[in-house]
Image (spheres, helix red, strand yellow):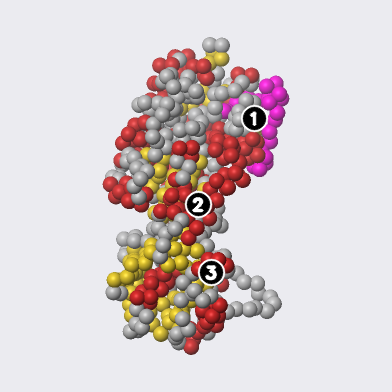
Amino acid sequence: MLYAVRSATALNRLLDTLPVFAGDHRVQPLFTLVPGSDFSTDALLALDGAGARTVPWARAVRGGHDLVVAASPNGPLHELPGPLVLLPHGAGFNKRLPRSSTDDSASGLHPRQLLRDGTPLASLHALAHPGQLARLAQQSAAVAGRAAVVGDPTLDRMLASRTRRERYRDALGTGGRRLVVAVSTWGPESLAERLPELPGRLTAELPYDSYQAALVLHPNVHSRLGGFALRQWLAPALAAGLRLARPYEEWATLLTAADCVLTDHGSTALYPAALDRPLIGCYAGGTELLPASPMAELLARVPRLTADRPLDAQIDAAVATHRTGDTSALAAAAFAEQGRSLELLRARCYRLLGLEPPPGPVTVRPLPVPRTGQERPTAFAARVEVSGNTVSVARYPLNSGPHGGQISAEDTVSTSHEMESAGLILRRARSMTTPVREPYGSDAVWTAGGWTARVLAEYRGCRTAAAVLAHDRCVLRRDGSALLTVSITADTTQSEPLVRPDPAAVLSAVHGWLDTNPDPALPATLECVVGGRPVRALVAYGTEADAHAEL
């Protein structure tokens, strides 16, 4: 078996088909890089990292393999001996040929890509939908005669992973927030080129406790810029909590976990559409998108982003007006045989090999849990509104722009400048940040009473020092006054999971309430709104035991 790889995009498509031959000792997978692509470097690095055996192109063209599988028709594939299985390199065929603004032939279906000296390049052209086969037949009857509809293996992985959605969101730290994912293709008409400020706007404009922002970039963008330059471009947004998906698998995981997707004309958006996620179109038009293609139809039906309107209002409206089945019905024009792609592809491939496939069904690999350990904001600006004992709070990463309101910093996390600027300084107990402690040697630990007194003495701008002991229990001190406790009770609505707010956000609400009530009658119950959800905070006088609680 020879996998002919032209780019990281093509490699990712090929890797999703590996279960077709999994467990068969008769099949040995080899990989080769097809020459001529500007985006092959990342593919080679990925193959090396996976421990895949690669063979040079000069050796591959001498033969010795029984089947070739590729996911791009470009390059000198005709030089490889043996039957060729050609897979699509994306969802559907939605773009014109590169550098063509008049030809309405789809890239990937054009005869000049699929024929070599008038002969079909592939023995099997695997397609995802009968409409693609009909379009191919209009271009070349000879190629269409070797084509078959087998479905989309990448979509089937996402469909099989839907039951893992909560697990993905737990790993992402989404909680009760709305996960908003911006998706960009590559090229001059892409979101990354036309709206480079959008990732920064997402982290700057969306309240941190209500929304989580993520970005999915085409693998060619990763290859063109490189990881270092990409992180430099996105540095402010990444520091404010933006999640950047890795180009293989993780992008699909994020879209499976998403609540709303902002997209340009790239075909990747057809996947969350098939999962029936609300979409917002960000494509301003151009020459790349084919009229009447599945992506063109999708973009014509979903809400469009208005650049000068608040993002949260547009996202909330898209979610609120979305009806079940809206986007999945539109994506149906790109995907058929859902859930059956690997079985159908295996039958075709083994027929070309002249072998009987192994017994039993093909197992679809679910998407992996996304990596943890992303950056999070080191300090916040909070807009707090107090009306009696009702307090609402909206927090924004401090580094994402001038937001006004109170500044909160976190000891051991924030910078010195942020600590000096903060009116609220908090510290989390080690039990919340470091679950496993070194069992040997001496241990130095602050008490809540000692730490709050030290912070108020050291940072003159600090009016409230708060110790977070648990998700539902905090201790705070105001300007050298008596110790107070805050007991947090989240909404216990049974129709949805219990959402525990970040205690730091509740402390911002309490801090704002104490600013307007410097001599409150305690105990007092505050009705707080954090991330759009109600939460109750009972503020009372602390005890000696509270003062001795360990941080």
Res. 384 visible in picture = yes
Give me the disc on residue 419.
3
Give me the disc on residue 237.
2
Give the total of numbered labels: 3
245 shown above or below 24:
below
Q: Amino acid at mark 2?
A: Ala
Where are the magenta residues, as a range?
Answer: 48-70
Res. 319 visible in picture = no
Q: Position of residue 421 (x, y in %)?
A: 50, 68
For label 3, the SS is helix
Question: In the rendered image, which residue does mark 1 sit on?
Answer: 33
Disc 2 versus disc 1: distance between alpha carbons? 35 Å
Q: Which image quarter holds the C terminus?
A: bottom right
Check if residue 234 falls in the magenta segment. Answer: no
Residue that appears at 61% across and 41% down:
226
Q: Position of residue 131 (x, y in %)?
A: 38, 25
Q: Which image quarter holds the N terminus?
A: top right
From the viewer's perspective, is 348 left or right of 492? right
Graded by Cα atoms within 10 Å as few (under 14), some (14 to 19) or many (20 or more), the crowding at tag 3 reads many
Q: Which is more toward the observer, 238 or 250? A: 238
189 shown above or below 148:
below
From the viewer's perspective, is 494 left or right of 421? left
Q: Amino acid at mark 1?
A: Leu
Residue that appears at 53% across and 75% down:
459
Q: Amino acid at mark 3?
A: Met
For label 1, the SS is strand
For label 2, the SS is helix
Residue that appears at 38% across and 34% down:
284
Disc 3 versus disc 2: distance between alpha carbons? 21 Å
Graded by Cα atoms within 10 Å as few (under 14), some (14 to 19) or many (20 or more), the crowding at tag 2 reads many
